[in-house]
Amino acid sequence: MTRLERLTEEEQRGLLTRLRARDETALAELYDRLSPWVLGVAHRILGDADEADEVLSDVFVQVWRRIDQHDASRGPLTPWVLSIARNRSLDVLRRRGRWRRKVALVEAEAKVEGDEPATSADLAEASVPGWPVHQAVHQALGALPEEQRQTVLLAYFEGLSHSEIAQRTGDPLGTVKTRLRLAQRKLEESLRYLKDWTA
Amino acid sequence: MSDWLGMAATPRSPRPELKARILARAYATPRRPLAWPLAVAALLVLGLAGGGVLWRRVTKLQSDLAATRDTLGLLRRPGTRVVTVPVVTNGRPGGLTIFADSLSHRWLVTCHNLTPNGPGEAYQLWFVTERGMRTAALMPMDQPNPMVLAFDLPPDAGRVMGLAMSVEPREGSVEPKGPMVFHVDL
């Protein structure tokens, strides 16, 4: 079963207010909504279940501690929480000096997982809130030319800088920058409607 | 918008036992205080301290300006007389310059290079009037720095015939009793 829960502005404000007021049930509610996605990001970047669990824990502790730093006028909670998950995962990846090994691991996994969206047939996760957003993001990524899509994935999930991507792909730096700029523009157009949604 | 890209990762259900552990860890974590109230408080304290310093500076400058205007006003008056009195205190050559305004009965005295007073002593200026010696000003001097004094002639002093200065106790004397530094007729 898939469902995409749309929080009205009032509901989102209510959730934020409760989080800021240290309402513990609000954090539990947010955990239920977002933990599969946070864990998904962490696992995708780190390729390690234990490390991903660690990141999951750190992310919700950070959300609880720093909820006052979330600016509701700049977007819903989901992208904010996912950005924490991504940054935290990349920190772990870099700090542990396992860059090269993880990259190899992620690449190997990508061959298995591919960059295809997970299917509801092989995943119980299809029932998690926000599943259609997952499909929408994949659809937006899939609409990109292959080289742009790969460039975006290298930047987002591997945290590579422009020059590191250029080195990896053997493309000129300017080409990498152009691809990312074009991809960013297309993704913004495709996913613009998500700014009013939260999973 | 790129932060939505995280949704491209395949979601993974966390192990059920993690939820209670993670939430317990979060609840036990003290919330980080907001940086901006601290910054505002720091700015407020700095502002108040800076304002206090500025206010004292402004007050001092206003006071200096008023004194300077008063001095200039005295010097510009047509009836102002200027008398220079060389003095020697404990072998040190110095001097006083007296600006006397006979119309407003205001006086301004500048002292240069006088020997600092001994413990418990002060220089005391006297008007020499037709009714006797009347105190004009007490000038305790602890450093050999130039000093400027402005004072008014007492209304019942009568005609001023001269000015004198003696060394008196620090609290001043009703009439000169200590050694006389100078006595000049005007």
Image: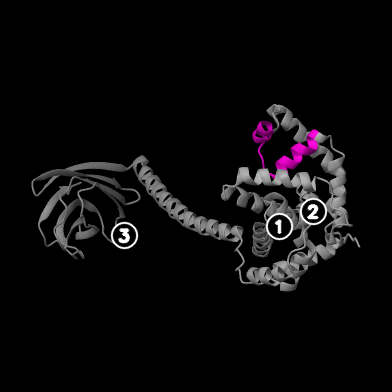
Q: Name the residue under label 1.
A: A70
The amino acid type found where label 3 is placed reads Pro
Q: Nearer the viewer, mark 2 or mark 1?
A: 2
Q: What element carries label 2?
A: loop
Residue drawn at (84%, 37%) of the image: A144
User: Front-most of A129 and B169?
Assistant: A129
Give the magenta part as a residue range: A147-168
Chain that bears disc 3: B
**Discs 3/1, front:** 1
Q: x, y (%) of residue A152? A: 75, 40
Residue receiving disc 3: B155
Q: How far apart are marks 2 and 1 (CA)?
A: 25 Å
Number of other residues with Cα within 10 Å of mark 3, as a class: few under 14, some 14 to 19, many 20 or more: few
B27 shown above or below B96: below
> Disc 1 residue type?
His
The residue that appears at 77% across and 38% down in the rendered structure is A150
Q: Mark 1 lies on which chain?
A: A
Is B39 situated left or right of A189 in this image? left
